[in-house]
Image (cartoon, rainbow, N blue to C red):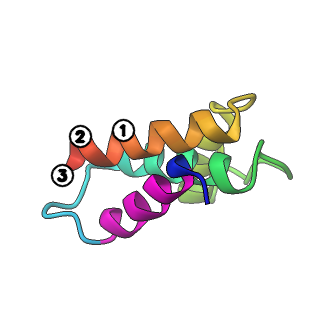
Amino acid sequence: MSDLKAQFEAAAQEAQSLPKRPNNENLLKLYAFYKQATVGDVTGKRPGFTDLVGRAKYDAWAERKGLSQDEAMQAYVNLVETLK
C-alpha cells in the first residue's frame, strides 16, 4: 500500500472522530474529496431542487472534476489535519 493511501485511510478514520463537528462547508469538502479519491469524477444526473442535501453534495463533488485520485487523497488528508 502506498504511503499516501495509508495516510488517506488514516485520515478517513480520524474524520469520524474529530473533536468538533466541521461546518457544512467543510463537510461538503470532505465528502467531495473522499468521493473523488475513491470513485473518480462525478457521474449521474444532478438531483432536483427538492433534494437540497443531494444537490449540494453533487455540486461539491462536481467542482473537483478532473482532480486525480492522488491529488484528491492529499487534499482530503490536508483538510482533516486542519480540522483536528
Mark 2 and mark 1 residues within 8 Å of each other at the beta carbon: yes
Q: CA distance from mark 3 to mark 1?
A: 10 Å
Residue linked to disc 2? 82
Highlighted magenta segment, given as a residue range: 5-16
Instruction: Identify residue for label 1.
Output: 78
> Which amino acid, by three-letter code, is at mark 3?
Lys
Q: Which mark is residue 84?
A: 3
In this rendering, does residue 13 appear at all? yes
Q: Which numbered marker is on residue 58?
A: none
Q: Most prominent secondary structure in the magenta stretch?
A: helix
User: Whole-percent x and y of residue 61?
Assistant: 63, 42
Tag 2: Cα neighbours inside 10 Å, few (<14), some, or many (≥20)?
Answer: few
* Residue 62: image location, x then y, percent: 69, 37
Residue nearer the viewer, 74 or 34? 74
Which residue is painted at 36% across and 38% down in the image? 78
Q: Give the left or right position of residue 57, taking residue 6 as reference.
A: right
Residue 1 in percent (x, y) is at 61, 60
Q: Residues within 10 Å of mark 3 (few under 14, many from 20)?
A: few
Q: Are marks 2 and 3 in contact (CB under 8 Å)?
A: yes
Q: What is the C-alpha distance between the residues marked 2 and 3?
A: 6 Å
Does the segment drawn in magenta span residue 14? yes
In-front residue for pair 19/47: 19
Q: Is residue 59 visible?
A: no
State how far apart marks 2 and 1 are (Cα): 6 Å
Residue situated in front as seen by the camera: 37 or 46: 37
Amino acid of disc 2: Thr
- For badge 1, the amino acid type reads Asn
For label 2, the SS is helix
Query: Residue 4 at what x, y percent from top left?
Result: 52, 47
Q: Are marks 3 and 1 in contact (CB under 8 Å)?
A: no
Residue placed at 38% from the left, 69% from the top? 13
From what the image shows, is residue 41 above or below residue 64?
below
